[in-house]
Image (spheres, grey):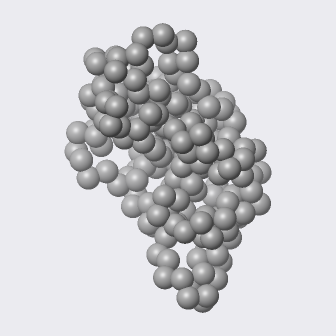
Amino acid sequence: MPDRFLYVYLDEAGNLDFSSNGTRFFVLGALTTTRPSGAYRDLTELKYDLIELGTNIEYFHAAEDTQAVRNRVFEVIKANFNGMRFDALIVEKRKTGPALRHEEKFYPTMLGYLIRFVIEHAVRDYTEVIVFTDRIPIQRKRKAIEKAVKQTLSAMLPSGVRYRVLHHDSKSNFGLQLADYITWAVYRKWDRDDARPFDLVRTVVKTQFDIFRTGTTFYY
């Protein structure tokens, strides 16, 4: 049987400032697909359509793009739902205990939950899992994320299934740009009570797991 690859694109939204000055929520998102879909082709066409219209755009980034550009990217996502799924882990930060707040503990714990869920619900006939993250300049954060992903995959994958973790610049990777857009939409819904972007990607978002949903202790 020829090799079959499962692609997982990870992204995050919010910050790790655990105080009243920080964001209300932190969101970890995972976009999962097999061989990258027609969305890549459509985003290439959109990029050059925009350039020809006079927009100087190098890549797509939801928080930085204009509303007009975001509308067009969301159209591409809606047109390519088939073959993609997105899962999000939601952290209400004020319920996060002090022992969990350091990057070296936070990422392995939270990403471990997310990756475990993704693998449990992925297609089953893959021979290799390739996980992409944006390029991470902070070494301790990069090590924490790699630790979480590798530990979870090594424990969960069937015997003989390979895995890799790749750090790519999101500017060069349409999968990471799609994950950024969907994560941003989920984040806006939770942190800003703005559901309009989420409504545009609702079909591809399969789960939003509020990890502290039953928690009753607020630390600040």
Q: Which of 22 and 46 is in front in this view?
A: 22
- Please indicate whether residue 135 sits to the left or right of residue 152 in the image: left
- Please indicate whether residue 91 sits to the left or right of residue 141 in the image: right
What is the x, y in percent for residue 148? 38, 31
- Please indicate whether residue 54 sits to the left or right of residue 217 in the image: right
Quarter occupied by the N terminus: top right
Quarter occupied by the C terminus: top left
Relative to 131, residue 66 above or below: below
Residue at point 72% right, 52% down?
200
Residue at point 65% right, 51% down?
197
Q: In which quarter of the image is residue 110?
A: top left
Relative to 104, residue 40 above or below: below
What is the x, y in percent for residue 48? 60, 82
Residue at point 60% right, 81% down?
50
Q: Is residue 101 visible to us here?
A: yes
Q: Nearer the viewer, residue 46 or 194?
A: 194
